[in-house]
Image: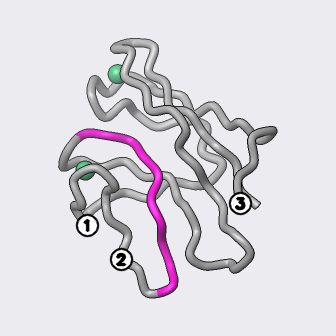
Amino acid sequence: MGHTVDFVCRACRYEERDLAVGHGRQPEPCLRLFHCDNCHSVGSTWLGAGRIARCSFCYHEAITLLADDAAGTPCPKCHAPGTFVHRRDQSWE
Ligand SMILES: [Zn+2]
Ligand SMILES: [Zn+2]
């Protein structure tokens, strides 16, 4: 029902592996990609079913959610274009 995603920045080599998007048997909660301006990171976090989306690293609430199929986002460390590698063959449930 979901797949794993890696974030890679070739400029500064910041990367986050084994992020995930999608949902389980219920449509909510679901995992969404985000970037956090508070701790300058990219990650995935649970959203929905009464949950407030928080950064999974610093628990800050003011995170920016990204589309599940986002191709990339500026690197939170160095602002160069970062890439999301979607591993649709690696599903989780
Ligand atoms: Zn970078
Ligand atoms: Zn954060």
Label 2 CB less than 8 angstroms from ligand 2:
no
Secondary structure of the magenta portion, mostly?
strand
Of 90 and 69, the residue lying toward us:
90
Contact (Cβ within 8 Å) of mark 1 with mark 3: no
Residue 61 in magenta? no
Question: Where is the N terminus found, in terms of image quarters?
Answer: bottom right
Q: Is residue 87 left or right of residue 39?
A: right
Q: Which residue is identified by label 3?
A: 93
Of 79 and 4, the residue lying toward us:
4
Q: x%, y% of residue 91? A: 75, 48
Contact (Cβ within 8 Å) of mark 2 with mark 1: yes
The mark nearer the N terminus, 1 or 3, is 1
Q: x%, y% of residue 44? A: 47, 52
SS of the residue under disc 1: loop
Image mark for residue 41: none
The residue type indicated by label 3 comes to Glu
- Label 1 to label 3: alpha-carbon separation: 25 Å
SS of the residue under disc 3: loop
Of 7 and 90, the residue lying toward us:
90
Q: Is residue 44 above or below residue 26?
A: above
Q: Which residue is identified by label 1?
A: 61
Q: x%, y% of residue 7? A: 50, 32
Q: To which quarter of the image does residue 90 belong?
A: top right
The residue type indicated by label 1 comes to Glu
Residue at the location (32% across, 27% down)?
Answer: 79
- Label 2 to label 1: alpha-carbon separation: 7 Å
The residue type indicated by label 2 comes to Ile
Q: x%, y% of residue 16? A: 44, 32
Query: For the view shown, which residue lies furthest in the right direction?
Result: 89
Q: Which residue is identified by label 2?
A: 52
Of 37 and 49, the residue lying toward us:
49
